[in-house]
Amino acid sequence: MKEAYNFQKIEEKWQKVWEERQVFEVEEDPAKPKFYCLEMYPYPSGRIHMGHVRNYSIGDVIARFKKMRGFNVLHPIGWDALGLPAENAAIKHGIHPQKWTLDNIDYMRSQLKRLGISYCWSREVNSCLPEYYRWNQWIFLKMLEQGLAYRRLSWVNWCPQCRTVLANEQVVAGRCWRCDSEVSQKKMEQWFLKITAYADELLSGHEKLTNWPEHVLQMQKNWIGKSEGALVNFKVPAVNKDIEVFTTRIDTIYGATFLVLSVEHPLTPELIADHPEKEKLLDWIKKTIAETRVRREIKEEEKEGYDTGLKAINPFTGQPVPIFLANYVLMDYGTGAVMGVPAHDQRDYEFATKYKLPIIPVIKPDSPDKQPPAGQAFEDYGILINSGEFNGLSSQEAMGKMAAAAEAKGLGRKSVTYRLRDWGVSRQRYWGTPIPVIYCETCGVQPVPYEQLPVEIPCKAEFSGEEGSPLERVPGFINTACPKCGGPARRETDTMDTFVDSSWYFFRYCSPHETRLPFDPEKAAYWLPVDLYIGGVEHAILHLIYSRFFTKYLRDLGLARIDEPFPHYLAQGMVTKDGAAMSKSRGNVVDPDEMVKAYGADALRVFILFASPPEKEFAWSEEGLEGCYRFILRIWNLVEENLDLFQCGDTLSAEQFDSASYQRLSKKLHQTIKKVTDDIEQRFHLNTAISALMELTNSLKKEKDALRSSQKGRELLKEALADLILLLAPFAPHLAEEMWQKTGGATLVAETSWPVYDPELAKEEMITIVVQINGKLRDKFEIEIDTDEEILKAKALSLPRIQELLGGKEPKKIVCVKNKLVSLVV
RNA sequence: GCCGGAGUGGCGGAAUAGGCAGACGCGCUGGACUCAAAAUCCAGUCCGAUUCACUUCGGGUGUGGGUUCGAUUCCCUCCUCCGGCACCA
């Protein structure tokens, strides 16, 4: 009696078994090779979406596969549980952020379990619990001690909608990355982490990341933005001060006919102190600062500047040059001051033209065809002219010599500048890690002593949505005693950017209940680095660069022993429907719950892995899902129909051995094992691995009747079915467990070894040789593998069709490739 | 503007080292089963010719060129789409 495929019953059954038997719980085991498989932990927004299903299904295939291959697999999950939406929910629906978050986690955990992902649940990490975020505070204090965490007054990106400060990375095209409202500028005391101290290593470390997608490395490179050049001092006799500029083109310095300072430059007030139109200037400066940096970027405004009336001395020419203030110079890059070389820089050219400043060419193109069109600066390298003793040198030679000359005279030096800026971590928010700092009127800024950690988020607070952090209105939180003098003091009310949490959570998984340190260094040394990290490319810059920074810092603290946390990063593609990313506003969201209900977790997993390779975009289609459901059903029926083979005692007596059929299936089986293994292990092409399983299933269906008519055939059929079940296990684990049990498997599939193929049996013994004439396919023939080229040639020439086409002519040339083809040229 | 990635049937995609383009799946067409439908099973399905037919021929991987006996694959040109950066001195 054939049993119908009841996925609901089967999936529930095996999820329970895995949980009860703690199949995926792991401990360090030096005897086994380890494998740390990690997917980006989710923000508990309420429900799992298809992007999560894809991310976690990919990871689960790898984790289950590695386990079957004998690895000690760590496959953890947790929750990126602090953050803005919880607070918004509190404002909107009056639910406490903690309750909202914990409820969401409970539901999403159940969803992940329903998908059958093989997580080690005892290591679950939750960043909104004090036992986790106290270590954010601990790390922060360590950084504070070493000057890597610091506080300064700075212009910050301010989102009026979210009423908070945003990191540069959270501003996208001048808008808030979350709510899309326009970002303005505000000056505030802010905490920063000195990621720039690691700028060079973050860049050079890329060399070790050979298993990262090229475009992600490129994005990080752009973000770090290293540029090598020189710092040069221009003296300003009128105020007896120096203005230092950064330039990557010191070879053009003889053409520097003016200086331009950012309006925010510290010397600005002094320079305009005696300006006749001081008031007008101050107004303009105010306006320019108010106009956000961000907005300037969008509009690419016309360059606008004011002459301060003062002169600086070009240290190379000795000539005085005017000093301007202008809107196109950024204070937070380089020194906030640049030398204007209008002949060789397009921006300076436009500025000089507008304000009628002299344009002196000092670089000549090394070939006439490089001459730029009229109205444009010549920005390429070339040969120096009008440059005194440096005339005739190439730009490259000149840069070294001129920097050395400047240095010798104490006028400058070689220098490297980065676009990367320190990481502003202050947030005026409630649902975040409190920054563990106390302000005392007498003692100033005091760190919270380690033994007082954690500084907990106070339970009671009001969520009115008014400006400022809710923490500012919790007296019990704010008012405290100074740890140094014991006098009355005030707590910092800013909380940390949630990217701090995710910068080290992968360490915490190694020892999630550690109470003395953020994590146990010995355990971390066993598990780390993460062998495979899988997640969306939207985190290519932020999360992945912060995590690399934290890893290097934790290494320097002596806690970690690795330089890079994720040597292998698999950037998973987006899930789309109707040509666009799934989103509520577009109304094209497909709910995983409904799909699991209708087709089962196994079918959903198989489909989401089958329809495109992991790194590419994935287009949702319910027909496709149905197709995968049918595939699963076909396997189920195939196994059901042949269950008798697994019963003890062979009752079938027919004996008609079909050798051809036997050979075909045997070869197909071993080739499939090879292909599925290689596709998962080496290429992560899970889609082609599944298609190979489909092919094997089709072959089994085709050959099964012929095979069942002999003892030997039945043995092979049995073996093939058993292997098919094992190969299927990483993709459709519930189905595999159920069928494995039905066919008499004593162990759990999850604890069974991966099938091994016999290379001899996987080999083709006959191979098709293609015959081409002038590159066109004209005929083909079958021959034994590894046949000598001479024989191939003879055979090809003897083919009637080829002889006919040659018409008695001798080929001019014959190319023979073993096991491939014979190519004739006439 | 600069940097990176990608363009293959009606659709998602395959071709792993330069060697039979279109595996596998969806969709579609025809057939079987059925009173009928659904489900299932079988066959076909790149385009255009050609043959009663087994067939045979031509074209074909965004465009145009190049290297090669041979190019989806390597090189150059251009087009389109996607992503990142963007007054960075």
Image (cartoon, coloured by chain):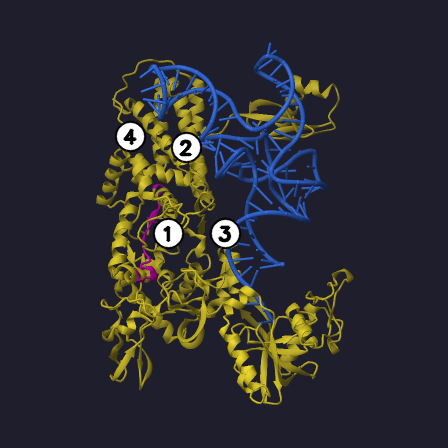
Chain colours: A yellow, B blue
Which disc, if any, is residue A545? none
Q: Chain of mark 1?
A: A
**Within the magenta stretch, is there residue A74?**
yes
Q: Secondary structure at mark 3?
A: loop
Look at mark 1 in the image and give the residue it sits on.
Answer: A38
Q: Which residue occupies the foreground of this view, A682 or A300?
A: A300
* Residue in view at x 38 percent, y 33 percent: A626
Look at mark 2 in the image and give the residue it sits on.
Answer: A693
- Residue type of the residue flagged with mark 1: Leu
Asked if the residues shown at circle 3 and circle 4 are in contact, with their CB atoms under 8 angstroms apart, the answer is no
Q: Earlier in the sequence, mark 3 or mark 4?
A: 4
Residue A807's place in the image compared with A328, above or below, is above
Residue A266: percent from the left, percent from the top? 52, 82
Q: Chain of mark 3?
A: A
Which disc, if any, is residue A5? 4
Asked if the residues shown at circle 4 and circle 2 are in contact, with their CB atoms under 8 angstroms apart, the answer is no
- Residue type of the residue flagged with mark 2: Leu
Q: Which residues are magenta?
A: A68-87
**CA gap, disc 1 to disc 4?**
32 Å
Q: Earlier in the sequence, mark 2 or mark 3?
A: 3
